[in-house]
Amino acid sequence: MSSEFDLIRRWFSPATDHTLLAGGDDAALVAPAPGCALAITTDMLVEGMHFLPGADPASLGHKTLAVNLSDLAAMGARPRWAFLALALPDADEDWIAAFASGFLALARTHGVDLAGGDTTRGPLNLCVTVIGEVPATRALRRDGARSGDDVWVSGCTGEAAIGLAVARGAIELPEIDAARCRRRLERPEPRVALGLALAGVASGAIDVSDGLVADLGHIAERSRCGIELDWRRLPHSSALAGVPFTERAAAVLAGGDDYELAFTAAPDRRDAVLAAGNAVGVPVTRIGRVTAGESGVRVLDADGRAIALAGGGFDHFRKAAR
Amino acid sequence: MSSEFDLIRRWFSPATDHTLLAGGDDAALVAPAPGCALAITTDMLVEGMHFLPGADPASLGHKTLAVNLSDLAAMGARPRWAFLALALPDADEDWIAAFASGFLALARTHGVDLAGGDTTRGPLNLCVTVIGEVPATRALRRDGARSGDDVWVSGCTGEAAIGLAVARGAIELPEIDAARCRRRLERPEPRVALGLALAGVASGAIDVSDGLVADLGHIAERSRCGIELDWRRLPHSSALAGVPFTERAAAVLAGGDDYELAFTAAPDRRDAVLAAGNAVGVPVTRIGRVTAGESGVRVLDADGRAIALAGGGFDHFRKAAR
């Protein structure tokens, strides 16, 4: 590759005890902690599919790493190494420097070494692989939920979806709320510390990237169980107070890109779950329970009746859920 | 991602002792061998840059993995896990199946599990991350060559470059030679077994992807030494017998894509190097020596004079090197 594309090599980590060699050889050499399994995730982001043309490069750098760290958080793993492969249509040094600044600032926050990567000319494409460490028996898998477990969510969902609606001009909000929602969309904070605190406590976990109901559906499917959510318990961001109810409910239940953790835990671990959230300063809310039988995810209203969610519509809400 | 893009998930490996979980969760979970370091490499291949539009998908699948396995071979690492991220312009099931068949056949040959990946719609882009295991003290690094070491190469170089010239119609060869050169270009065989046999024996290594002289230049640079090659010792493929001398010399010294191993070893390891090659059935040839001082790579003719290689030209060859 021509040297102007090799800018990213400047940011490879220096050698440490756990990153023996980053860049400059045929492969990176890393030394995992003894006794740990490795959690490994790869995400490929394409312009026009995952981000808009002209997206702010620093935010894009942040988010490109954040979505991968969120996957590791949902495994209860401690992120250690990142590998960044980039296809760029041209060698725009300013763009690359801004992208790297966002990526590397988040990496530093979480103690992640940029251990390798690749750069080439081509249509804009960002591919990140992140590796984390977790004792195998403490890993948070999607197939670990059991009937009778509680269902929990961190923080609140819906802000990112409303942030996207604001960015598109579909919804207007007071400036402070709009800024909060847009920041949530563009600079999501992966729940790494919470995932680590929940390892060995939660029975199953997933990060909320596609929407709360859809993502919990993956836990239900893999754990061969059902999930019932109590609509009244779902946390709502105060930034969404000005959003019409139907749009707000859709965002909370089906909005993607929030990167909260949705997880399950046995009822006798309630204190441990609350202590984990408290220890890392992230609110956790008990929002439902795991049921027997492969019945998917149902959202129940105040009277215990299932709210129809078909096709992303929430028509039943106006009368049933308030 | 829409389900038609999820075809690749069919090929994720079943759970084993060292691959605890491949696919179906937020991340793969793998269990590295105790006491090993991990060698990790990422390559991104883009249509038009690394392969021609319309390339045979099975060969492309093979080569996409092969170039990464070659990087691990050059570290002396045993490849264990691959992660495959694909951007595809459309969900052509036949294309994907053929690509996967080439990729997975090579993975099986080398005992590599496809442990995870990602698929998305976008301009054709193939990004592979491969992870291998190697005891840290036995890893073959580019910075390990020492003045006085021998320089070796496996097999022979130049066939892939001539294969490309044949494919482009720039050179004509007898059919059997042309087929051999084209196969070398399209279906390179990474020297994984040789790399493993050389771990702890060779002092430094690199795979020949950019050309023998250029790649040995990386060892010289990283090891802060010089390298002298003896032109008369360089192995020439019999398939190149019909290639005009100048083009043949250029291919042997500067042709890329052969994926042989070029490596250094102390003179007292000559028997061990030959035994390693013999054990895995790969010829190894001693082609030069490591010198003191950062003087790059020089190719010496029969009289010990340096042959000029400037600009990829080999004008000096006709009179000096035969």
Image (cartoon, coloured by chain):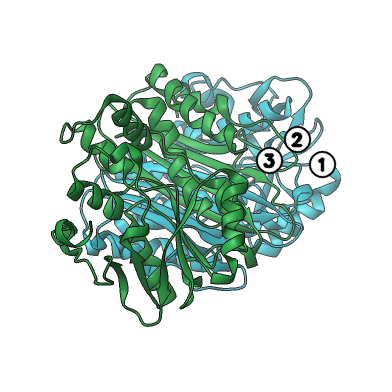
Chain colours: A green, B cyan
Chain letter for mark 3? A
Check if mark 3's residue and mark 2's residue have beta carbons within 8 Å.
no
Does the rendering let one see residue A79?
no
Give the percent coordinates (x, y) of residue A154. Answer: 46, 51
- Locate residue B37, reporting x and y percent: 70, 51
Question: Is label 1 in a helix, a strand or a loop?
Answer: loop
Residue that lies at the very extreme toward the right in this rendered image: B268
Circle 3 residue: A19
Q: Quadrant of the N terminus of chain B?
A: bottom left
Q: Which mark is residue B266?
A: 1
Mark 1 or 3: the one toward you: 3
- Tag of residue A18: none
The relative height of residue B276 versus residue A226 in the rendered view (above or below) is above
Vertical position of residue B63 compared to residue A214: above or below: above
Marks 2,1: beta carbons within 8 A: no
* Secondary structure state at the residue bearing disc 3: strand
Q: Which mark is residue B145?
A: 2
Amino acid residing under circle 1:
Ala
At a point 32% along the width and 37% down the height, the residue shown is: A239
The image quadrant where one finds the C terminus of chain B is top right
What amino acid is at disc 3? Thr
Q: Are marks 2 and 1 on the same chain?
A: yes
Residue B295 image offset from top left, x and y in percent: 69, 19
- Using the rendered image, report if marks 1 and 3 lie on a common chain: no
State left or right for residue B234 relative to residue B149: left
Q: Is residue B64 visible?
A: yes
Q: For the residues marked 3 and 2, what is the alpha-carbon distance in whole angstroms?
A: 21 Å
- Label 1, residues with CA under 10 Å away: few <14, some 14-19, many ≥20: many
